Image (spheres, rainbow, N blue to C red):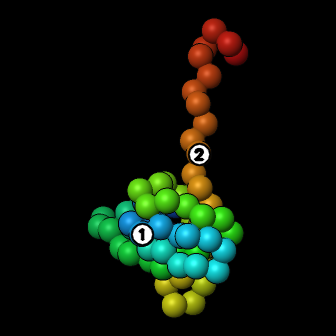
Amino acid sequence: MTDPVQGLTGTLTSPIRGPGMLGEVLVAIRGGTEIYIARAAEPISAGETVLIIAVQPGRIVDVVPWIPLEPVPVDDI
């Protein structure tokens, strides 16, 4: 069974300074917010939005930077 935070986005409350280093991510879930320990393959600054791609034991989540797609104007379709 997958953890319900996998696939959600969150906001880093402390930076991930590089591979193997940990930060914290705030995730909106179950009508509230929860803090998870976050790790990534690259540095990510505090305040950035991230996508949770995997959940590990001990409330550790693997994250990647979240870059939302720009909307395509209807005239360009």
The answer, for residue 29, to whether it is visible in the render is: no
Residue 33 on image: x %, y % = 33, 68
The residue shown at (47%, 67%) is 15
User: Which of the marked residues, 1 or 2, is nearer the chain's N terminus?
Assistant: 1
Which quarter of the picture shows residue 34?
A: bottom left
Residue 40 relative to residue 58: left or right: right
69 over 9 or under it: above or below? above
Residue 11 is situated, as x and y percent measured from the top left of the image, at 43, 60
| Within-10-Å neighbours for mark 2: few <14, some 14–19, many 20+ | few
Where's residue 51, x and y in %?
Answer: 57, 59
Q: Which residue is mark 2?
A: 67
User: Are discs 1 and 2 less than 8 Å apart at CB?
Assistant: no
Instruction: State the residue at coordinates (55%, 70%).
Output: 17
Q: Quadrant of residue 10?
A: bottom left
Q: Which residue is mark 1?
A: 14
Q: Measuring 49% from the left and 84% from the top, which residue is drawn there?
A: 59
C-alpha gap between disc 1 and disc 2: 19 Å
Callout 1, which amino acid? Answer: Ser
The quadrant in which the N terminus is found is bottom right
